[in-house]
Image (tube, rainbow, N blue to C red):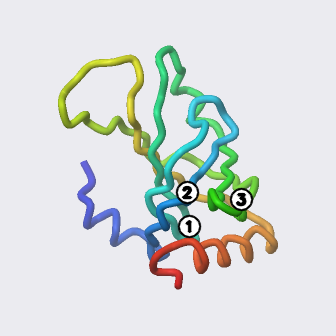
Amino acid sequence: MVSEKELRDRRRHKRHLPKEWVSAHGQTSIVGIARLLDISKGGAAFQYVRGPGVKLATLKKTLILHLFETVTSQGVKDIECKVVYDTEVPREDNSQGDHRLRRCGVQFGNHNWYQSSQLDLFIRDFTLEGN
């Protein structure tokens, strides 16, 4: 298992924490609306709820992600990415249920100059460290 420090050392870009009202939306029913946990020029991490009967094989394909600020709907659309990890978040009360909270990390693929500039603006305007 790779340690948290080793993961940080491998990253090329600084991670930024989003403001509370920043979300992500994956163009697949497996992810749906998610809460953005952190973001950089190279990728992002988010939490989402996975319902029963969902096939995880969908995550092995290229994922199209939309990042948006919930109040104004400003953001970046159609970012291609690949899933680096997808893991279940343990429940604090150890309860059982059909829906599971997941944490997913993605690496952004190639994006055009417009998406790159929109991503820069998104990080600047909608993250705590960006301001």
Q: Is residue 85 left or right of residue 27?
A: left
- The earlier-in-sequence mark between 1 and 3 is 1
Residue at the image position 59 percent from the left and 51 percent from the top: 24
C-alpha distance separating marks 1 and 3: 22 Å
- Name the amino acid, label 2: Gln
Does residue 102 lie above or below 58 as drawn?
below
C-alpha distance separating marks 1 and 2: 6 Å
Is there a contact, CB below 8 Å, between mark 1 and mark 2? yes
- Name the amino acid, label 1: Gly
Q: Is residue 1 left or right of residue 63?
A: left
Residue that mark 2 sits on:
107
Q: Is residue 94 left or right of residue 103?
A: left
- Classify mark 3: helix, strand or loop: loop
Q: Residue furthest front?
A: 71
Residue that mark 1 sits on:
42
Does residue 83 lie above or below 36 as drawn?
above
Indicate which disc residue 73 carries: 3
Is there a contact, CB below 8 Å, between mark 1 and mark 3? no
Q: Residue furthest bottom?
A: 131
Q: Position of residue 49 (x, y in %)?
A: 46, 33
- Classify mark 1: helix, strand or loop: loop
